[in-house]
Image (cartoon, grey):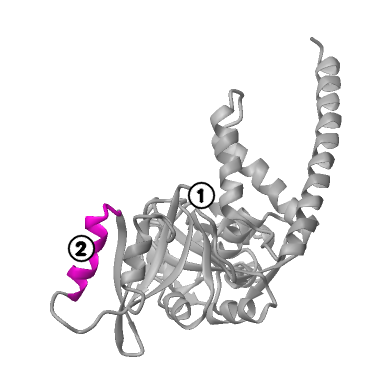
Amino acid sequence: MTLDELRDKIDNIDDALLKLYNERMELVHQVGEVKNTTGAPIYRPEREQAILNRLKSQNKGKLTDAAIDALFLEMFAVARNLELPEGVAYLGPEASFTHQAAESKFGAMSAYLPISSIPGVFREVKKGTAKFGVIPIENSSNGIVSDTINCLDEYDLKIIAEVCLDVHMAFATVSDDITKITKIYSKDIAFGQCRKFLQDLGLDEVEHIPVESTVKAAKLALKDETAAALCPAVAAKLNNLPIRFNNVEDDTNNRTRFFIISDFENASSGNDKTSLLVRLSNKPGSLVNFLNDFEEAHVNLTKIKSHIVEGESIFFIEFHGHQNDAHIKPILEKHKDEIKILGSYVKEIDDI
């Protein structure tokens, strides 16, 4: 088959895809009209995950599971915005890891609102300025994010999804000679995460200047031939800052997990995780007794972290299953005065 013949076949398939996409969007529009009459949320993570699982199970072509996710999640995002455009607040600025996490779920077409603080994200979702909020909950190197726990305790919002991203840093500069670098901009935490790289290249003794975001670091480095930035590759590309080295972090398995919050609860997907905040009485054995109920019900606890909120010790606990599962619901009802259910959502990862 000639190149022109192959291209003709691709064009025919594209024409067919366009027709099918429009047919799907018409059905999506009808679904949106039904949801508007019932007040049901437009975004249903458990429904989207069920579609992806079904497609992957019957896939016999060249598309990988990751490619199916990328193609269809973007289509879902386009469909949601046709139904009802809804804002997505995230811990900014633009091109931050949280922004990348948001786009991985809501696609490129959504209306994004960068917010300068985690409490600010919660406030804007609570007020209705944005329907969804995206915030970090933990990093594999640095642990739980205290501000997120505090806000989950304070606000009556629900976790509706989780996202996990590999955290990679780039070394970017306009200079062609790294021996002329006299200063490096980045967030304070990034210098520690890239310590070995900086030592290996003799950059551990130049001036390290902490700034509030890696995006700002890229902007500052762009203006100075003696400066460089440690930042995500997307931040460098956004600012047209040349990348000299990629993946310069010490821990190649460095990952950050994010929560998506909103004002509704998910139905069960059959593959869920639930997060709780637990306040127990200050008595010997109270935590053990609480956890024993989960063990007796054969519930897989995946995380138990203690946390201090206004001088009071609380526990952040996660387990596999949905809050309405038959073997879980009685436990939560028994301890209803001690727990705050933060949400049940489709399980993306076991732990980081």
Question: Disc 1 designates what residue?
Answer: 269
| Residue 204 visible, this orientation | no
**Viewer-proximal residue among 142 and 183:** 142
**Viewer-proximal residue among 153 and 35:** 35
Instruction: Identify the magenta region.
Output: 286-299
Residue 82 drawn above or below residue 121: above
Q: Can you give x and y, in whole percent of width and height, for residue 338 in the image?
A: 32, 78
Q: Secondary structure at mark 1?
A: loop
Q: Secondary structure at mark 2?
A: helix
Does the magenta segment cover residue 22? no
Looking at the rendered image, the quarter that the C terminus falls into is bottom left
Q: CA distance from mark 1 to mark 2?
A: 26 Å
Question: Mark 1 Cα within 10 Å, few/some/many (few <14, many 20+)?
Answer: some
Q: Can you give x and y, in whole percent of width and height, for residue 306 in the image?
A: 28, 74
**Rendered image quadrant of residue 280:** bottom left
Q: Is residue 302 left or right of residue 291?
A: right
Q: Is residue 282 left or right of residue 32?
A: left
Q: Can you give x and y, in whole percent of width and height, for residue 229 in the image?
A: 54, 65
Looking at the rendered image, the quarter that the N terminus falls into is top right
**Viewer-proximal residue among 174 and 323:** 323
Determine the residue positioned at 41% across, 65% down.
Answer: 275
In the displayed image of the protein, which residue is found farthest to the bottom? 311
Question: Mark 2 Cα within 10 Å, few/some/many (few <14, many 20+)?
Answer: few
**Viewer-proximal residue among 137 and 348:** 348
Question: Disc 2 designates what residue?
Answer: 292
- N-term-proximal mark, 1 vs 2: 1
The label on residue 220 is none
Tag 2: amino acid: Asn
